[in-house]
Amino acid sequence: MRSLILAGLFLSASVATPALAQVQQDNPNAANQSMESSSQMRGLRQEQTTQSDMLRMDAQRNQAATPAPTTGPNAIGPHVGTGVIGR
């Protein structure tokens, strides 16, 4: 995951340069290359967002599933009744 983040940061720095943002008139493939780079960056950003959202959800799920700590040295767990009422 760290490698994806570093790759994304590197690509965002290289794609964000003004020279690459402009389409070159003498290169007929420049527009296609520019759109391809933009598409790759969007894909990386979406993947990073998805991974961070999944990690956040996992952390929240684990936190919600953790039982509350017992209080005091002689704490007893939940009481399970015998099912007999009034005796």
Image (cartoon, rainbow, N blue to C red):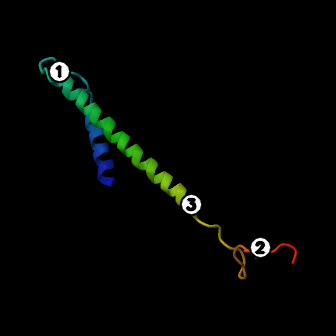
Identify which amino acid the numbered label 3 is placed on: Gln
Query: Which residue position is annotated with label 2?
Result: 83
Which corner quadrant of the image does residue 67 belong to? bottom right
SS assignment at label 1: loop
Does residue 13 sit above or below 58 in this rendering? Answer: above
Q: Earlier in the sequence, mark 2 or mark 1?
A: 1
Q: Looking at the rendered structure, which numbered label has been put on residue 63?
A: 3
Give the alpha-carbon distance from disc 3 to disc 2, as whole Å.
33 Å
Whether residues under marks 3 and 1 lie with C-beta atoms below 8 angstroms apart, the answer is no
Which numbered disc covers residue 24? 1
Q: Judging from the image, what secondary structure is the residue with disc 3 in?
A: helix
Front in this rendered view, residue 32 or 7: 32
- For the C terminus, which image quadrant? bottom right
Which residue is at a point 59% across and 59% down the rendered structure image?
64
User: Within 10 angstroms of label 3, few (less than 14), some, or many (20 or more) residues?
Assistant: few
Q: Residues within 10 Å of mark 2 (few under 14, many from 20)?
A: few
At x 27% / y 43%, what residue is drawn? 10
SS at badge 2? loop
41, 55: nearer the viewer: 55
Closer to the eye: label 2 or 1: 2
Judge by depth and name the residue closer to the eye, 10 or 28. Answer: 28
**Count of number-bearing discs:** 3
Please name the amino acid that badge 2 sits on. Answer: Gly
Distance from Cα at disc 3 to Cα at disc 1: 53 Å
Nearest to N terminus: mark 3 or mark 1 = 1
Identity, as a three-letter code, of the amino acid under mark 1: Gln
Place of residue 42 in the rendered image (x, y in percent of width and height, measured from the top left): 33, 35
Nearer mark to the viewer, of 3 and 1: 3
